[in-house]
Amino acid sequence: MLLMNSCIQLIEGHDVANTDIPITLTPLKPTKGQNIFLTPRLDSENFTRCSWYRGMAANSEELIFTYDRPVFYMVGDAYTGRETLGADCSLHIKYCVTDNSGTYTITMEGSVIATGQVNLDISDGLDSVDPDQTEDMALKLDVPLPKTAPWKTKDIVGLVFGI
Protein backbone atom coordinates (compact mmCIF):
# COMPACT_ATOMS: atom_id res chain seq x y z
CA MET A 1 0.00 0.00 0.00
CA LEU A 2 2.86 2.36 0.75
CA LEU A 3 4.33 1.82 -2.73
CA MET A 4 1.00 2.63 -4.39
CA ASN A 5 0.66 5.89 -2.44
CA SER A 6 4.17 6.92 -3.47
CA CYS A 7 3.39 6.33 -7.15
CA ILE A 8 0.19 8.35 -6.95
CA GLN A 9 2.01 11.23 -5.31
CA LEU A 10 4.66 11.22 -8.04
CA ILE A 11 2.04 11.32 -10.77
CA GLU A 12 0.07 14.07 -9.05
CA GLY A 13 3.25 16.10 -8.54
CA HIS A 14 4.19 15.95 -12.24
CA ASP A 15 3.72 19.29 -13.97
CA VAL A 16 1.94 18.27 -17.18
CA ALA A 17 1.37 21.81 -18.47
CA ASN A 18 5.07 22.70 -18.50
CA THR A 19 6.74 19.59 -19.88
CA ASP A 20 9.74 20.81 -21.86
CA ILE A 21 11.54 18.70 -24.43
CA PRO A 22 15.30 19.16 -24.50
CA ILE A 23 16.57 18.90 -28.10
CA THR A 24 20.03 17.77 -29.18
CA LEU A 25 21.47 19.45 -32.29
CA THR A 26 23.93 17.40 -34.37
CA PRO A 27 26.36 18.76 -35.47
CA LEU A 28 26.58 21.48 -32.82
CA LYS A 29 27.74 24.17 -35.27
CA PRO A 30 26.25 23.23 -38.63
CA THR A 31 27.48 24.71 -41.89
CA LYS A 32 25.82 24.98 -45.27
CA GLY A 33 25.52 21.64 -47.08
CA GLN A 34 25.63 19.44 -43.97
CA ASN A 35 22.93 17.06 -42.81
CA ILE A 36 21.40 18.14 -39.51
CA PHE A 37 19.61 16.12 -36.84
CA LEU A 38 17.33 17.69 -34.20
CA THR A 39 16.68 14.92 -31.69
CA PRO A 40 14.18 15.27 -28.83
CA ARG A 41 15.55 13.85 -25.59
CA LEU A 42 12.24 12.50 -24.39
CA ASP A 43 11.02 8.91 -24.64
CA SER A 44 8.91 8.95 -27.80
CA GLU A 45 7.23 5.66 -26.84
CA ASN A 46 4.87 7.58 -24.53
CA PHE A 47 3.58 9.75 -27.36
CA THR A 48 1.13 9.04 -30.17
CA ARG A 49 1.77 12.23 -32.16
CA CYS A 50 4.74 14.45 -32.85
CA SER A 51 4.86 17.60 -34.98
CA TRP A 52 7.75 19.80 -36.10
CA TYR A 53 7.37 23.49 -36.93
CA ARG A 54 9.74 26.01 -38.51
CA GLY A 55 9.28 28.93 -36.13
CA MET A 56 8.34 29.63 -32.54
CA ALA A 57 4.59 29.23 -32.91
CA ALA A 58 2.94 25.87 -33.45
CA ASN A 59 0.62 26.99 -36.25
CA SER A 60 -0.32 25.46 -39.58
CA GLU A 61 1.73 27.90 -41.70
CA GLU A 62 4.91 26.83 -39.90
CA LEU A 63 4.17 23.07 -39.91
CA ILE A 64 6.88 20.90 -41.46
CA PHE A 65 5.10 17.63 -40.71
CA THR A 66 2.99 15.70 -38.24
CA TYR A 67 3.29 12.02 -37.46
CA ASP A 68 0.42 10.13 -35.81
CA ARG A 69 1.28 6.59 -34.79
CA PRO A 70 1.21 4.11 -36.23
CA VAL A 71 0.83 5.14 -39.87
CA PHE A 72 -0.46 8.69 -40.49
CA TYR A 73 2.10 11.18 -41.80
CA MET A 74 1.18 14.66 -43.04
CA VAL A 75 3.45 17.35 -44.50
CA GLY A 76 2.73 21.03 -43.91
CA ASP A 77 3.32 24.35 -45.64
CA ALA A 78 6.88 24.68 -44.29
CA TYR A 79 7.96 21.30 -45.73
CA THR A 80 10.72 21.73 -48.36
CA GLY A 81 11.28 18.11 -49.37
CA ARG A 82 14.63 17.90 -47.57
CA GLU A 83 13.15 17.04 -44.16
CA THR A 84 12.52 13.52 -42.89
CA LEU A 85 11.31 12.18 -39.57
CA GLY A 86 13.21 9.60 -37.52
CA ALA A 87 11.58 6.81 -35.52
CA ASP A 88 12.34 8.76 -32.31
CA CYS A 89 10.54 11.86 -33.70
CA SER A 90 13.88 13.42 -34.65
CA LEU A 91 13.98 15.92 -37.50
CA HIS A 92 16.59 15.33 -40.21
CA ILE A 93 17.32 18.20 -42.61
CA LYS A 94 19.36 17.15 -45.65
CA TYR A 95 21.84 19.51 -47.31
CA CYS A 96 20.98 22.47 -45.11
CA VAL A 97 21.15 26.03 -46.40
CA THR A 98 21.50 29.30 -44.49
CA ASP A 99 17.75 29.89 -44.95
CA ASN A 100 17.21 26.90 -42.63
CA SER A 101 18.48 29.07 -39.75
CA GLY A 102 15.91 29.95 -37.12
CA THR A 103 13.84 28.45 -34.35
CA TYR A 104 12.37 24.96 -34.63
CA THR A 105 9.53 23.79 -32.39
CA ILE A 106 8.41 20.25 -31.62
CA THR A 107 5.17 19.20 -29.95
CA MET A 108 4.63 15.67 -28.71
CA GLU A 109 1.22 14.46 -27.59
CA GLY A 110 0.11 11.37 -25.72
CA SER A 111 -0.76 11.04 -22.06
CA VAL A 112 0.84 14.50 -21.71
CA ILE A 113 1.58 17.33 -24.12
CA ALA A 114 5.20 18.42 -24.32
CA THR A 115 6.95 21.10 -26.36
CA GLY A 116 10.52 22.00 -27.12
CA GLN A 117 12.41 24.60 -29.12
CA VAL A 118 15.90 24.86 -30.52
CA ASN A 119 17.61 27.68 -32.38
CA LEU A 120 19.45 26.59 -35.51
CA ASP A 121 22.20 28.86 -36.85
CA ILE A 122 23.61 27.69 -40.19
CA SER A 123 27.00 29.13 -41.14
CA ASP A 124 27.96 29.40 -44.79
CA GLY A 125 31.39 28.04 -43.82
CA LEU A 126 33.30 31.10 -45.03
CA ASP A 127 32.68 33.19 -41.94
CA SER A 128 34.05 30.59 -39.53
CA VAL A 129 37.51 32.24 -39.63
CA ASP A 130 37.96 35.86 -38.57
CA PRO A 131 39.63 37.77 -41.45
CA ASP A 132 41.80 39.63 -38.94
CA GLN A 133 43.44 36.40 -37.74
CA THR A 134 45.97 36.02 -40.58
CA GLU A 135 48.78 35.24 -38.14
CA ASP A 136 46.80 32.40 -36.56
CA MET A 137 45.93 31.10 -40.04
CA ALA A 138 49.64 31.09 -40.96
CA LEU A 139 50.37 28.86 -37.99
CA LYS A 140 47.62 26.41 -38.98
CA LEU A 141 48.78 26.26 -42.61
CA ASP A 142 52.48 26.32 -41.66
CA VAL A 143 52.97 29.13 -44.20
CA PRO A 144 54.63 32.42 -43.22
CA LEU A 145 52.34 35.38 -43.87
CA PRO A 146 53.29 39.01 -43.35
CA LYS A 147 51.70 40.85 -40.42
CA THR A 148 49.67 42.93 -42.88
CA ALA A 149 48.51 40.70 -45.69
CA PRO A 150 46.97 42.31 -48.81
CA TRP A 151 44.23 39.66 -48.80
CA LYS A 152 41.63 38.52 -46.34
CA THR A 153 41.90 35.09 -44.72
CA LYS A 154 38.78 33.81 -46.49
CA ASP A 155 40.51 34.56 -49.84
CA ILE A 156 43.09 31.81 -49.21
CA VAL A 157 40.55 29.06 -48.54
CA GLY A 158 41.04 27.64 -52.06
CA LEU A 159 44.87 27.39 -51.97
CA VAL A 160 46.34 23.92 -52.43
CA PHE A 161 49.80 23.11 -51.11
CA GLY A 162 51.88 20.27 -52.58
CA ILE A 163 53.58 17.80 -50.32
Image (cartoon, rainbow, N blue to C red):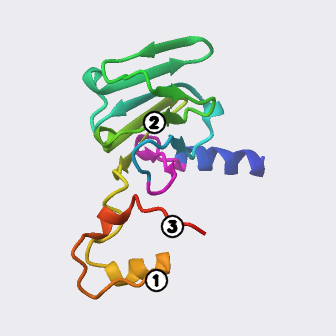
Q: Label 3: state its secondary structure.
A: loop
- In the rendered structure, which disc, 1 or 3, sits on the residue that comes first in sequence? 1
Q: Determine whether 148 is above or below 112 in the image.
A: below
Image coordinates for residue 155, horizontal then vertical, percent: 30, 63
**Which residue is label 3 attached to?**
161
Q: Element under label 1?
A: helix
Q: Which residue is painted at 57% across and 47% down in the image?
A: 41
As shown in the figure, which amino acid type bears the numbered disc 1? Leu
Above/below status of 67 relative to 15: above
Q: Where is residue 120 drawn, in percent x and y?
A: 37, 48
* Magenta region includes residue 6: no
Q: Secondary structure at mark 2?
A: loop
Residues shaded magenta: 13-29
The disc at residue 95 is 2
Q: Residue at x 54, y 43 (%)?
A: 39
Q: Residue 139, labelled with which disc?
A: 1
Real-space Cα separation, disc 1 to disc 3, in angstroms: 14 Å
Q: Position of residue 64 (x, y in %)?
A: 38, 25
